[in-house]
Amino acid sequence: MSKLKADVQIIQAGIFSQWDSQSTELPRFLKATVHVPAEIDIEFGFVTRIKKAKNQKLRYCIYHPDIPDADGNIRAPFDGEMYIKENDWRFYLGDTIWAPINNKTGNWRMTLELNGKVVADKTFKVHLPSELPAG
């Protein structure tokens, strides 16, 4: 018997309301964009819809620009794993900006993997507010 191939789509990407990790609700979608202003507590990322993958292990990863920790060492990417809960499941992967903002600018790449294969990949460009592209 053949195994069904998972169907993964990014359905929203951009800026969201603050996410409550303790809630089952996804954050509210506010604006479609890959250009994010470096403002404290701004929430950005993407929502995927994952079908035909219940109980499979999903690996997520957020690659930050070279952000130093308190000791001046470059932070490692933020990653983890979880199991897909339903056959038609929505998953939010995102991050937020914290102080100081001047070292948070650059590319933030967010990926999802199933069975060792990248199935969702989005890069957000975080800019100082004065450097945001017009429009």
Image (cartoon, rainbow, N blue to C red):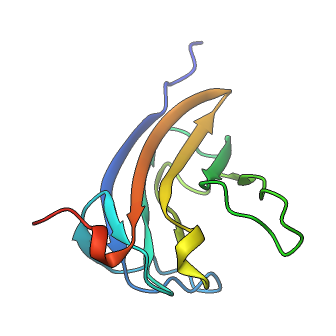
| Quadrant in which the N terminus is drawn | top right
| Residue 4 x %, y % | 51, 24
102 above or below 1? below
Q: Residue at x 56, y 86 (%)?
A: 20
Q: Is residue 112 visible?
A: yes
Numbered label tally: 0
Residue depicted at 35% across the width and 68% down the height? 36
Q: Is residue 98 left or right of residue 13?
A: right
Q: Quadrant of residue 22?
A: bottom right
Q: Nearer the viewer, residue 68 or 19?
A: 68
Whole-percent x, y for residue 88 in the image: 44, 52
Q: Residue furthest left?
A: 135
In the depicted view, which residue is nearer to us: 59 or 84? 59
- In the shown orientation, is residue 80 left or right of residue 51? right
71 relative position to 76: left or right: right
Instruction: Pick the quarter of the image with the C terminus.
Output: bottom left
Q: Residue furthest right?
A: 71
Report whether residue 97 is seen: no
Where in the figure is residue 122, as x and y percent of width and height? 42, 46
> x%, y% of residue 127?
38, 66
Residue located at (46% from left, 40% from top)? 120
